[in-house]
């Protein structure tokens, strides 16, 4: 057992920031002496004194032998991994590295169609061929959940030469599929299970939270420590266990994807967040779950509102694509008020200073984390109470099953690999002229960053209708060259 009280990287950074010396190395602001005054006024000088480079005492992220190595070993033990890598380019680079380390050009990888855009980037970088599975769909809530074990088994029977399976656990709504069953099926083919666990870094620290991906049998998982724990934005971790994944390939992939000048502020925040959770995680998560449970109960009692609820017990009362729910993720259905999620989001933000994580056509989703206070919760409850009383409408003019059309039908025929389409000669056409053409760019509403179109896919009318409705309702379309969505880039 390692001493989880230690924070080796943070301590080394603190000591170097306080050491008197003449700095003739990067960064150019020289521990804040050259920083602009408005920036210093906002952040204070202390943070810039700690904004250091790879000094002798601070180790090297790409070849760690000192304090970074110690910090990563402590993280491995705390999160239940055999090896851990710190990420300063978010979970995005971790997902990309996972695909690069397991798949080469022409190799098949099985993954859900509602993956994050980082997985599509991994396909483009690696040249891998995606075998997409449609996630389980809830037609009542109009929400896509997880892929199912049966779908994975069927795909592997049809594609026994696949090199890996990748899944999302939990989804952006906090829904967890049957990861243990998927791991068992995947391992029967002696290939690794990769998990995008960006929103599940807290699972290891409380028994009332869903089973962590590694404990469920995943070979690799990527976690955004900044999303739900106490690290700084962009600070994430990649963990592996077992022998199905070559750790050296992970290291080499990350060298391609991460900056050679990593921020020690981000790295130290990972070290500190790990210590905080290792020492106090259960207490912090107990408090967070208590706040969440109280909020869930009170909002569900407001007429016109409902909340996404967990199965009766993990693995029971749900469905193959929904066996558990992260209760710190609060999804409120507002369509009963005659409002879209986008309209409700705007009202809450502008009128009540309550800001959700993201909005969708019928829902608002909130992250309740260790940083939220009872005052936050009271403000949230008051805003919803007023919303239901003063902003209610008689009906909602939204086509409510667009997700079903998009992700449970064959809207997404792949004509060539994402890499081939990305690098192909392309042309830009008006949106109305792109039906049945091959897309040459990533197009996705953000958040949650799930691509509706990707390079290599045939553009269809349901997809175009969905994008236009999302835009009309106030959603943000990202990834494409034309942010106004008047044109799309297609393969020539």
Image (cartoon, rainbow, N blue to C red):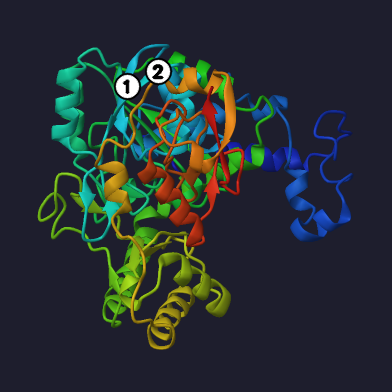
In the displayed orientation, state which residue is furthest to the bottom. 389
- Give the image location of residue 31, x and y in percent: 81, 42
- Of residues 125 and 70, which is closer to you in this image? 125
Above or below 415: residue 481: below
Q: Residue at x 89, y 34 (%)?
A: 22
Tell me the quadrant of the picture where the C terminus can be found. top right
Q: Is residue 311 left or right of residue 205?
A: left
Marks 1 & 2, CB-CB < 8 Å contact: yes
Above or below 103: residue 40: below
For label 1, the residue is 109
Q: Mark 2, residues whose alpha carbon is within 10 Å: few (<14), some, or many (≥20)? A: many
Q: Is residue 35 left or right of residue 214?
A: right
Secondary structure under tag 2 reads loop
In the displayed orientation, state which residue is furthest to the left. 316
- Give the image location of residue 128, x and y in percent: 40, 18
For label 2, the residue is 128
Rendered image quadrant of residue 435: top left
Q: Is residue 105 visible?
A: yes
- Of residues 79 and 67, which is closer to you in this image? 79
- Give the image location of residue 167, x and y in percent: 31, 35
Q: Is residue 481 left or right of residue 91?
A: right
In the displayed orientation, state which residue is furthest to the front. 433
Point out the tag, 1 or 2, that comes first from the N-terminus.
1
Above or below 391: residue 217: above
Q: Residue at x 31, y 50 (%)?
A: 403
Secondary structure under tag 1 reads strand
Q: Mark 1, residues whose alpha carbon is within 10 Å: few (<14), some, or many (≥20)? A: many
- Of residues 251 and 338, which is closer to you in this image? 338
């Amino acid at each position: 057992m390692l001493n989880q009280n230690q924070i080796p990287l943070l301590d080394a950074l603190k000591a170097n920031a306080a050491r008197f010396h003449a700095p003739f190395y990067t960064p150019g602001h020289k521990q804040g002496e050259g920083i602009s005054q408005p920036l210093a006024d906002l952040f204070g000088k202390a943070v810039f004194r700690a904004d250091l480079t790879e000094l002798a005492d601070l180790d090297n992220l790409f070849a760690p032998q000192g304090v970074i190595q110690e910090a990563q070993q402590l993280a491995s033990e705390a999160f239940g991994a055999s090896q851990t890598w710190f990420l300063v380019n978010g979970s995005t680079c971790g997902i990309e590295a996972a695909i690069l380390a397991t798949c080469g050009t022409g190799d098949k990888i099985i993954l859900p169609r509602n993956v994050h855009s980082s997985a599509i980037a991994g396909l483009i970088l690696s040249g891998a061929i995606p075998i997409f599975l449609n996630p389980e769909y809830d037609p009542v809530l109009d929400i896509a959940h997880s892929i199912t074990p049966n779908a994975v088994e069927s795909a592997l029977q049809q594609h026994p030469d696949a090199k890996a399976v990748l899944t999302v656990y939990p989804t952006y709504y906090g829904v967890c599929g049957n990861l243990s069953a998927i791991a068992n099926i995947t391992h029967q083919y002696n290939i690794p299970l990769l998990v995008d666990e960006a929103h599940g870094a807290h699972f290891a620290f409380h028994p009332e939270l869903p089973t962590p991906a590694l404990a469920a049998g995943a070979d690799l998982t990527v976690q955004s420590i900044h999303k739900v724990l106490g690290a700084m934005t962009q600070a994430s971790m990649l963990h592996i266990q077992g022998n199905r994944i070559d750790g050296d390939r992970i290291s080499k992939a990350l060298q391609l994807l991460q900056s050679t000048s990593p921020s020690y502020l981000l790295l130290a925040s990972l070290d500190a967040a790990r210590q905080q959770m290792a020492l106090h995680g259960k207490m912090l998560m107990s408090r967070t779950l208590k706040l969440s449970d109280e909020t869930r109960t009170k909002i569900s009692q407001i007429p016109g509102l409902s909340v996404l609820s967990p199965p009766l017990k993990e693995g029971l009362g749900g469905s193959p694509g929904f066996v558990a729910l992260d209760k710190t993720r609060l999804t409120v259905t507002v369509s009963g008020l005659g409002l879209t999620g986008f309209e409700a989001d705007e009202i809450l933000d502008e009128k009540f200073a309550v800001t959700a994580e993201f909005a969708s056509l019928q829902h608002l989703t909130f992250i309740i984390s260790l940083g939220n206070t009872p005052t936050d919760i009271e403000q949230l409850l008051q805003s919803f109470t007023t919303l239901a009383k003063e902003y209610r409408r008689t009906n909602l003019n939204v086509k409510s099953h667009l997700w079903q059309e998009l992700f449970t039908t064959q809207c997404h025929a792949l004509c060539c690999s994402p890499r081939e389409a990305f690098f192909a000669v392309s042309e830009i056409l008006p949106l109305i002229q792109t039906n049945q053409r091959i897309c040459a760019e990533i197009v996705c509403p953000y958040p949650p960053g799930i691509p509706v179109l990707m390079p290599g896919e045939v553009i269809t009318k349901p997809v175009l209708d969905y994008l236009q409705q999302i835009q009309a309702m106030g959603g943000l379309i990202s990834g494409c060259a034309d942010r106004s969505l008047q044109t799309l880039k297609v393969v020539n």
